[in-house]
């Protein structure tokens, strides 16, 4: 192989890699965005299910729930309020901010 052929092969290979990266960069960006959305959806599902399960218990303890959801990286903030009627707690309401989105979860309490 001569010097010109080697130089031509390197040039063609460089153009191939440049074009190859331009084709797969949008696909990689879309994949990364989809994985972020999936991770956020699973976090929302976990937070909601665990909150409702904790509310359904007769010996509910929101501190246990706070410890359980502390592992969720997407959970930025939460606030728990009691929904009462006649002095009896009927439900608990959690207002959570997950990945910048506000989410309200209502869990019915057992008597």
Image (cartoon, rainbow, N blue to C red):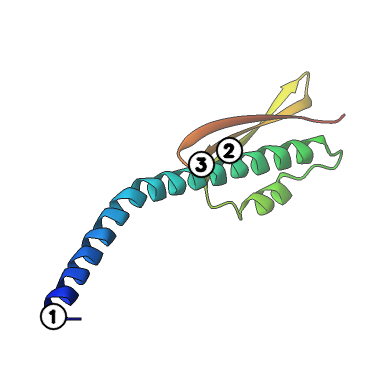
Query: Which residue shows up at 15% across the image and 81% down it?
Result: 2
Residue in front for this viewpoint, 17 or 50:
17
Give me the disc on residue 27: none
Q: Which residue is mark 3?
A: 37
Where is residue 20, by image quadrant? Answer: bottom left
Residue 89 lies, with reference to residue 97, above or below; the image says: above
Residue 46 lies, with reference to residue 83, above or below; the image says: below
Where is residue 88, by image quadrant? Answer: top right
Q: Secondary structure at mark 2?
A: strand
Q: Percent x, y for residue 56?
A: 82, 35
Q: CA distance from mark 2 to mark 3?
A: 23 Å
Give me the disc on residue 3: 1
Query: Which residue shows up at 60% across the image and 39% down it?
Result: 44
Q: CA distance from mark 1 to mark 2?
A: 70 Å
Mark 2: give few (<14), some (14-19) or many (20+) Cα within 10 Å: few
> In the picture, which quadrant includes the N terminus?
bottom left
Left or right for 57, reference 25: right
Q: Secondary structure at mark 1?
A: helix
Query: Which residue shows up at 78% across the image and 23% down it?
Result: 87
Q: Nearer the viewer, mark 1 or mark 2?
A: 1
Q: CA distance from mark 1 to mark 3?
A: 50 Å
**Which residue ends up furthest to the left in the rendered image?**
4
**Which residue ends up furthest to the top in the rendered image?**
86
Lower position in the chain sequence, tag 1 or tag 3: 1
Mark 3: give few (<14), some (14-19) or many (20+) Cα within 10 Å: few
Query: Which residue shows up at 49% across the image and 46% down it?
Result: 36
> In the picture, which quadrant includes the C terminus?
top right
Residue 85 lies, with reference to residue 46, above or below; the image says: above
Q: Nearer the viewer, mark 1 or mark 3?
A: 1
Q: Percent x, y for residue 91?
A: 74, 27
Mark 1: give few (<14), some (14-19) or many (20+) Cα within 10 Å: few
Q: Which residue is mark 2?
A: 79
């Amino acid at each position: 192989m001569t010097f010109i052929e080697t130089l031509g092969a390197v040039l063609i290979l460089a153009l191939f890699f440049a074009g190859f990266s331009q084709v797969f960069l949008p696909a990689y960006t879309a994949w990364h965005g989809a994985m972020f959305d999936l991770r956020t959806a699973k976090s929302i599902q976990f937070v909601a299910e665990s909150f409702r399960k904790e509310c359904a218990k007769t010996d509910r303890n929101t501190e246990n729930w706070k410890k359980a959801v502390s592992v969720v990286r997407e959970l930025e903030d939460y606030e728990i309020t009691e929904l009462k009627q006649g002095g009896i707690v009927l439900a608990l309401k959690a207002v959570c901010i997950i990945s910048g989105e506000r989410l309200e979860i209502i869990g019915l309490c057992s008597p």
